Image: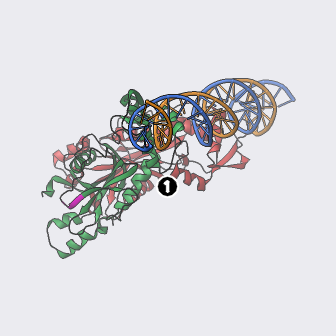
Chain colours: A green, B red, C blue, D orange
Amino acid sequence: MDLSVYMNSVSVDCVVFGFNNGLMKVLLLKMKYTHEWTLPGGFVRKEETVESAATRILKERTGLDNIFLKQFRVFSEPERSKMNPAVSDLVASGANPDLDWFAQRFISIGFYALVDFTKAVPTPDYFSEKAEWRNIDEVDPLIIDHSLILQKALNTLRLQISYQPIGYNLLPDKFTMPELQKLYETILGKKLDRRNFQRRMLSFNILNKLPETKKGGAHKAPFLYEFNLENYKKALENGLGGGW
Amino acid sequence: MDLSVYMNSVSVDCVVFGFNNGLMKVLLLKMKYTHEWTLPGGFVRKEETVESAATRILKERTGLDNIFLKQFRVFSEPERSKMNPAVSDLVASGANPDLDWFAQRFISIGFYALVDFTKAVPTPDYFSEKAEWRNIDEVDPLIIDHSLILQKALNTLRLQISYQPIGYNLLPDKFTMPELQKLYETILGKKLDRRNFQRRMLSFNILNKLPETKKGGAHKAPFLYEFNLENYKKALENGLGGGW
DNA sequence: TAACAATATGTCATTACGACACAATAAAAT
DNA sequence: ATTTTATTGTGTCGTAATGACATATTGTTA
């Protein structure tokens, strides 16, 4: 492992949200040896931006390109690196010259990502023995400040859902209104009225209603929708209205 | 100047907004020698967070404590450091051993700050000959990517004004409704209806109406208001409603 | 003391929102 | 085949929020 390709001092941590079976999921890695859980993350190569780094890392962890990714916070407590018990133990033992590098102070750029659960293939990295989806409310304590990062990502997502569109890259290309609603309910952690939800969602003009319906469910076939990408992107830039 | 106290690779740039005479202002520094304009910024000491760094830097540039500060974006183009013509010229000349340090790749954490124009005392730093307020729409091109940073800060501020309270630390402790409205109009760049503005603003419950009025203007004396800090902070956390 | 200029406040029509009910239909049960 | 069941599509109604607008009020200045 050639550490010289990476910038010093800067790392990236990603909170990858997925959505399945009415539950909000987050992608976690289980470390080799210490068996502690972490967020997927990594370092920034000398020639890439932090966004490229996050994109590269998530491609490795999920197999996906074109992930919705958003910087949401920098985590820079000077003591945060020392909160990693695995590294500090290893450093103390003087086992490996690389450990000095890992023991340096890192400032971590927090990203959150929204991905299509059904398409992502969780894949561990060099340091981890497995990668898997966990329900958002069944997450064990994570190393360092990763629990904090997860919590802040969720907070940010819940705030942003009020003024920015959500769902592209988190749902399949074609989806039903009940599926979209479930996504909102899951992120917000509360039930919404079916009829009022649809009315408001349609008023944003970011959906195209398709002529097809989704058969196979045991009941009345719901219509399929897709995002109107042009308007969706406008809404990402300018918000969903409701302000001044 | 002892550079060893700073972290490598990480810097902080601050977009400091002020508000005076109905105009939105931004604090800029004019560099020595090259006379180019920059945003106030600096490096992160080895024992401080990026927030502490920004707070320290702004205290130096304005004399103010307790500034409203918000991280809004990391700027990490690998080429951005090389876009500083002053440094690259100096590096090429081999003039000063410190220059290697300045020429390294920096990732910059962008903050925006909202300050009380009347209380801030613009103060240049080691690299600059003067510090001054400029009208937001009369800013000359800035070094490196600072024009981009300024533009992104303004965008962020305009989006956030729709779902978060604004004004504390930007207005005097006691202010009138027309002053608050002017602030909103300035940030948003458009006129608002006086009566509707007041009605909506009061509905947020973040203002205390004071019994006093502000005399001295050439007309009917407007009432003074102050922010209700408790509710203001709640609103910062949870937004102003209007979502789901 | 009258004119002025800006402020305080109220009304009305329109729109958005929350709560709610009933008709339609795909699949499964009979 | 027919009925049952669960879920979706759609509409209404009362209330609250919003946008447009007019009139009364009051420090200052002429």
Residue bearing mark 1:
B64
Q: Going 33% across and 35% down the picture, which residue do you hit?
A: A173
Name the chain letter of the residue that bears numbered label 1.
Answer: B
Q: Magenta segment range?
A: A123-130
Residue B2 spot, x, y in % from top left: 28, 61
B197 on left or right of D2: right
Disc 1 secondary structure class: loop
How crowded pointer 1 is (Cα within 10 Å; few <14, some 14-19, many 20+) is rated as some
Q: Going 12% across and 57% down the picture, which residue do you hit?
A: A2
Which of the two residues, B132 or A174, is positioned nearer the viewer here? A174
Q: Is residue B202 above or below residue A86?
A: above
**Magenta segment main secondary structure:** loop
Which of the two residues, B194 or B135, is positioned nearer the viewer here? B194
Residue A105 spot, x, y in % from top left: 27, 63
Judged from this view, the residue extending furthest toward the bottom is: A93
Q: What residue type is labelled 1?
A: Leu
Q: How many discs appear?
A: 1
Which of the two residues, C13 or B145, is positioned nearer the viewer here? C13
Instruction: Verify whether residue A133 appears in magenta.
Output: no
Q: Is residue A203 above or below residue A54?
A: above
Residue A99 spot, x, y in % from top left: 18, 67
Residue A4 spot, x, y in % from top left: 14, 56
Query: The N terminus of chain A appears in which quarter of the rendering?
Result: bottom left
Q: Is residue A42 above or below residue B136?
A: below
Query: The C terminus of chain A appears in which quarter of the rendering?
Result: top right
Would you identify the image quadrant in which residue B149 lies? top left
A33 on left or right of C16: left
